[in-house]
Amino acid sequence: MNSEDLAFSDATAIGKAIARKSLSSVEVTKLYLDRLERFGKTYGAVVTIMHERALREARAADKEIAAGRTRGPLHGVPYGVKDLLAAVGAPTTWGAAPYRDQVFDYDATVVKRLQAAGAVLCAKLAMVELAGGFGYNEADASFTGPGRTPWNRNYWSGGSSSGPGAATSAGLVGFSIGSETNGSIMVPSAYCGVSGLRPTYGRVSRHGAMALMWTSDKLGPICRSARDTDTVLRAIAGADANDATSRDKPFGGVRGRRPKLAIVKGATAKSQPEVVRNFEASLHVLSESCDLVPDVPLPKGDYTDVFTAVFNGECASAFRDLIESGRSRELQSPSDKLGGYAVYGSLAVDYVDGMRLRALLNRAVVRAMEPYDAIVHPTLSTVALPIDLPFDKAYPKYPGVLDMGSVGNLTGLPSISVPNGLGENHLPTGLALLGKAWGEATLTQIAKAYQARTSFHLRRPALVTAP
Amino acid sequence: MSTRRAFLAAAASTALAGAAPPSPGPTQSPPPPKAPKVSAAARALAESMRTFDRALSSGDVETIARNIDGNLKLGAAIDPKGRALRNWDEPATVFEATE
């Protein structure tokens, strides 16, 4: 296997090669450190490359494996984390200039769990400033510059986990950890053509992660295959005394029958033609392993506005100190410089009403999903947005009609996005499955069956170095 | 106060009295003439943000006011006329006493 093939292998394959000693952790770690140096800035994917810590952990992994002690499928596998997770040995910048020198002297629980699994931390990866909390409307919304999809660097990698999406797609890490409050794992996964899993709210401890919206923040894997998302999620999941919302829950999965999928009504309305075409082709593939039920309506509800009402209150509280300090003006995006003041001016009564409506919508969605194992839809209505246009000016003809991000995040339900083809400008499109609470194993099971019948997840972007 | 709108109107007059004076150094051009009308409450809240950053320009304050106004309208729109929420509908998170 040449170095390019190795770089683009999924974490499962890399872990197997390390376990059978045909590859050392140090060898693959050096490969990724070199690629992070060569391509990380080109794609706006990296904040800090952690040479010292990575090589120390890789040597330790090799030593343990040589001594016959293996920690599991991720032992020796290099990875990166979105730069909102605390990790010893690097600043934790939250993508934002006011925090660029912030240092924590402890590891986030997710980092500790991956260390216990033997994985090797290589890099803190770029992100949209404050995970997009202040309402950015353009790709250039981080002190490290815009994230760029490896499929065409004139287009955005998506956000707010822009670095994890781009670095995983470009083969700069074995896998990565992103976060999602509303779209931040699913969007970069779709725009970068990789497999991303947003877990159920409470599946993964957020201890050591920047808070944006306590009742919606989730951490999850962004990988080059659905099987990797399953492996990584199992390594980071579970209750943690430092996060009262975290839970130990079984993973489950569908046994002894075909999964039943609802095709949500309006799934492809006002979407780019290639998104529609790829989604229809995906349904054909899914029908080989699942039963599909067309035109299933979502319960009526103003999901987007209810989400926003709740978001405003929590975001303003989370960043009250920054807003009141007047340092928002140091942020990169023009919208973000002022956006904090707008959320600060929201009303408490709207927050509480939002949370009351959330409870009603949650019950309605759970009832609607009861007959199905998952809801299937295109991840997004378009391919990646161009770097040089405001978001609202990019594809005005194709806004879609469903906001599945707000539906899933308001209700805390898990979702997976996998690549399902190429669209306009040869950019990736995504297929998404929204599951029941704690039903991640069902989602990865369906996605693995899809990837066993397709090769979109194996396609590689042709990388360039910055001019 | 019979409605949220009435409350906001009253709040506007109060908040305006206590708001920080406008910044002496506006650096941006005034908003386009066709911009939607912003409520007095939103404008008052936006002006009050000069407490945190006295260098906010008139254009900045106008932008903040428009965004606050959007949020206020959104808050009023999520349950128009109180049709969805009844008195006893609890929020998604409920406070729990701990031992």
Image: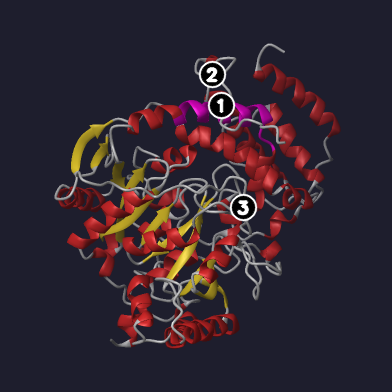
Q: Which residue is mark 1?
A: A356
Give residue B38's quadrant in the image.
Answer: top right
Q: Which residues are magenta?
A: A345-362
The alpha-carbon separation of the residues under discs 2 and 1 comes to: 7 Å
Provide residue A435's location: percent of width, then percent of height.
36, 43
- Chain under label 1? A
- Indicate which disc residue B85 carries: 2
Q: Residue at x 54, y 65 (%)?
A: A113
The kind of secondary structure element at disc 2 is loop
Nearest to viewer (mark 2 / mark 3): 2
Q: Residue at x 38, y 69 (%)?
A: A169
Give residue A413's quadrant in the image.
Answer: top left
Residue farthest to the top, as pictured: B2
The kind of secondary structure element at disc 1 is helix
Tag 2: amino acid: Leu
Q: Is residue A133 left or right of residue A366?
A: right
Q: In this rendered view, identify the residue nearer to me: A377 or A58.
A: A58
Q: Quadrant of the N terminus of chain A?
A: bottom left
Q: Residues within 10 Å of mark 3 (few under 14, many from 20)?
A: many
Q: Is residue A382 left or right of residue B1?
A: left
Q: Residue at x 79, y 47 (%)?
A: B52
Q: Which residue is mark 3?
A: A336
Q: Is residue B28 magenta?
A: no
Q: Quadrant of the C terminus of chain A?
A: bottom left
Tag 1: amino acid: Arg
